Amino acid sequence: DTEVTQTPKHLVMGMTNKKSLKCEQHMGHRAMYWYKQKAKKPPELMFVYSYEKLSINESVPSRFSPECPNSSLLNLHLHALQPEDSALYLCASSTTGTGVSEQYFGPGTRLTVT
Amino acid sequence: AQSVAQPEDQVNVAEGNPLTVKCTYSVSGNPYLFWYVQYPNRGLQFLLKYITGDNLVKGSYGFEAEFNKSQTSFHLKKPSALVSDSALYFCAVSFLYNQGGKLIFGQGTELSVKP
């Protein structure tokens, strides 16, 4: 099973809402990633978890809060977002975080902030 | 600084013709190179990678790429394009013990294959 699943597929939220994105993989991968992607642009890395510990935070605003409850799950908690945060949010995983292994991406959550 | 360049925003090819999507990179040390494809409203899908060894790498769906160290290039190729190959293609680079396995992406090339 080489699948990364993400829920929900679509999310519309107001600027005062709190919501969460969920990502799951059952490939035994030990590195998991959150990306933000605008239309027809490359994904922008937000966070990396390696062995369930946060290893990279790419200076992401605190209104985005990641969580890795266990090796298969990755959450992204959203609070007080801005309209410019509307984007496709992609989760990915890889065997390790050493740079050698390819990343497997989920289908994404399309987020609209109103 | 590490970087990846995809010099063409768009590539247009007739179905059945060979296709090439270009990628050049700049990395200190030995690079690990990847190609991903993204279909509309989908996540990225891994196509192939070069880590070491044979310079010609074969991947999914009949795609291949050639690593050229002297030209610092990793062009994606397919002998005969299909309409279903139309998508957005990203080249990416990483390197050994890169912190967190961070990928550095090119800007993407939109491939359009017409019947």
Image (cartoon, helix red, strand yellow):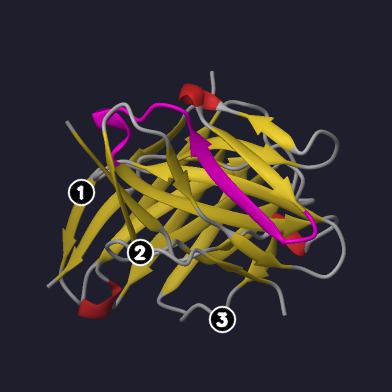
Q: Amino acid at mark 3?
A: Ser
Q: What quarter of the picture does the N terminus of chain B occupy?
A: bottom right
The furthest residue to the left: A114
Quadrant hosting residue A15: bottom left
Q: Are marks 3 and 1 in contact (CB under 8 Å)?
A: no
Q: CA distance from mark 3 to mark 1?
A: 25 Å
Q: Residues within 10 Å of mark 1 (few under 14, many from 20)?
A: few
User: Where is B45 relative to A81, above or below?
Assistant: above
Asked whether, in this view, residue B88 is left or right of residue A11, the answer is right
User: Residue A93: x percent and y percent?
Assistant: 59, 42
Q: Residues within 10 Å of mark 3 (few under 14, many from 20)?
A: few
- Say if the magenta span includes residue B75: yes
Asked whether, in this view, residue B38 is left or right of residue A95, the answer is left
User: Where is B3 relative to B108, above or below?
Assistant: below
Task: Give the camera-side residue of A85 and B9.
Answer: B9
- Is circle 1 on the same chain as circle 2? no
Give the extent of the magenta segment: B69-86
Q: Which residue is mark 1?
A: A10
For residue A20, the mark is none
Q: Which residue is mark 3?
A: A59
Q: Which residue is mark 2?
A: B9
